[in-house]
Image (cartoon, rainbow, N blue to C red):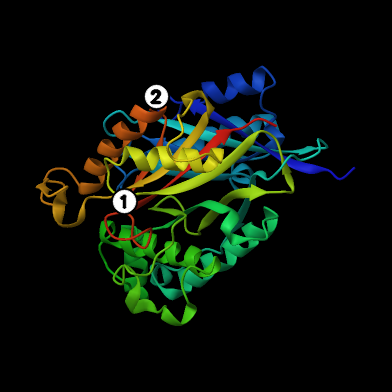
């Protein structure tokens, strides 16, 4: 009998970025085998900006904990397991990590089930961030992840999480010394270019955009070019891009499936339900059992022009609070009102991720075998 792969999904509540107690508890009771852990995607309570060091702190803490269980160095842990963090748990969002495991399973498959693949790019030079070099590197990593997930049809891909580098002050200084041209010298201002380039890399690999339409000038500018399934973030804690691709495959077993949808605004509760229903394979008017929802991953965006249903908001004009923090707080409350669980991955900034003003959302659910 052919051996299939089974993906496990576990949520880890975190009291602070250094809290590994939930992970230790799952390992202690045998729920999770350390050698089967492949990735973690989480939210920390930092500011989400270029100086958000909670993301690196969280990776360091978990890597130290897992190094003891795996018998390898913390640095080797970070090369073996993909860590993706988004800073900012505004409003009701709860700091947490979603842990993914992959294990062999001889159970006969019963339809397509959740599968995942991981692709890693080389380290990027500062002058390559936010350029076609990054787009093409991510596209190749997505293709590698697609093959690893054993997904033959891009239509079965529902969520591609990419974390890549932004331009830190040190990176800007390095490029300046070498006379290299950057997309911007502003660390926080580099985030749209970095997120946009990685999103276009996903779109290119999955056939959502034509390669001939892409060049450096369109990145973070031509928003009519986009992907419907990417969720991209940029941080100063890494230099390469990590791609985590999720979809449904007939080569996978288990009781989990994934689906996706489009949020028309930050208060689109119907869009949240639609993503869950897509994963469950039921109509959008079906009732939802919140206990079946295992994880939600979404992007949050301010309404175009700051107008929400024709009414003015201050998201884009508030000089004290960045619009991404407003949007994350608003969307987090809407999603939690549907699922009942505030441990939600909501990331800000949707450059080339759905149409302007809209945002992607993906849901992992439990279905009968």
Q: Nearer the viewer, residue 335 or 188?
A: 335
Which residue corresponds to the image point at 25% horizontal and 62% vertical from the top-left? 186
Which residue corresponds to the image point at 22% horizontal and 41% vertical from the top-left? 326
x%, y% of residue 314?
Answer: 11, 46
Which circle, 1 or 2, is nearer the viewer? 2
As helix, strand or loop, the secondary structure at mark 2 comes to loop
Q: Earlier in the sequence, mark 1 or mark 2?
A: 1
**Quadrant location, the C terminus:** top right
Residue 340 badge? 2
Q: Is residue 269 left or right of residue 41?
A: left
x%, y% of residue 216?
Answer: 37, 77
Which of the 4 image quadrants contains residue 164? bottom left
As helix, strand or loop, the secondary structure at mark 1 comes to loop
Q: Is residue 124 left or right of residue 2?
A: left
223 w.r.t. 84: above or below? below
Label 1 CA crowd tier, 10 Å (few <14, some 14–19, many 20+) = many
Label 2 CA crowd tier, 10 Å (few <14, some 14–19, many 20+) = few
Reading the image, the residue beneath label 1 is 50
Which residue corresponds to the image point at 49% horizontal and 39% vertical from the top-left? 277
x%, y% of residue 72?
Answer: 68, 39
196 w.r.t. 349: above or below? below
Residue 83 badge? none
x%, y% of residue 301?
Answer: 28, 50
């Amino acid at each position: 009998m052919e051996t299939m792969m089974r993906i496990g999904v576990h949520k880890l509540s975190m009291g602070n970025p250094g809290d590994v107690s939930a992970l230790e508890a799952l390992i202690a009771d045998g729920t999770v085998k350390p050698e089967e852990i492949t990735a973690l995607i989480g939210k920390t309570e930092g500011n989400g900006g270029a100086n958000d060091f909670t993301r690196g702190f969280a990776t360091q803490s978990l890597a130290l904990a897992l190094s003891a269980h795996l018998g390898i160095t913390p640095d080797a842990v970070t090369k073996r397991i993909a860590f993706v963090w988004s800073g900012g748990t505004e409003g009701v969002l709860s700091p947490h990590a979603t842990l993914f495991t992959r294990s062999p399973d001889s159970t006969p498959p019963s339809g397509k089930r959740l599968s995942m693949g991981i692709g890693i790019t080389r380290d990027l030079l500062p002058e390559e961030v936010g350029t076609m070099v990054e787009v093409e590197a991510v596209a190749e990593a997505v293709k590698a992840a697609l093959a690893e997930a054993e997904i033959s049809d891009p239509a079965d891909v529902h969520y591609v999480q990419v974390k890549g580098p932004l331009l830190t002050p040190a990176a800007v200084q390095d490029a300046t010394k070498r006379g290299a041209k950057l997309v911007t010298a502003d660390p926080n201002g580099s985030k749209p270019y970095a997120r946009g380039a990685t999103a276009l890399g996903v779109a290119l690999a999955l056939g959502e955009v034509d390669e001939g339409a892409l060049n450096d000038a369109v990145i973070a500018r031509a928003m009519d070019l986009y992907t419907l399934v990417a969720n991209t973030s940029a941080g100063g804690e890494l230099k390469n891009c990590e791609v985590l691709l999720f979809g449904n495959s007939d080569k996978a077993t288990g009781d989990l499936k994934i689906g996706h949808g489009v949020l028309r605004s930050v208060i689109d509760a119907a869009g949240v339900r639609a993503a869950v229903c897509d994963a469950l394979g039921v109509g959008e008017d079906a009732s939802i059992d919140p206990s079946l929802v295992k994880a939600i991953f979404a992007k949050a965006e301010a309404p175009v022009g700051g107008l929400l249903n024709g009414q003015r908001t201050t998201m884009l004009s508030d000089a004290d609070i960045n619009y991404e923090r407003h949007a994350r707080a608003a969307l987090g409350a809407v999603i939690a009102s549907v699922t009942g669980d505030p441990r939600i991955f909501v990331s800000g900034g949707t450059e080339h991720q759905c149409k302007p003003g809209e945002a992607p959302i993906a849901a992992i659910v439990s279905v009968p075998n």
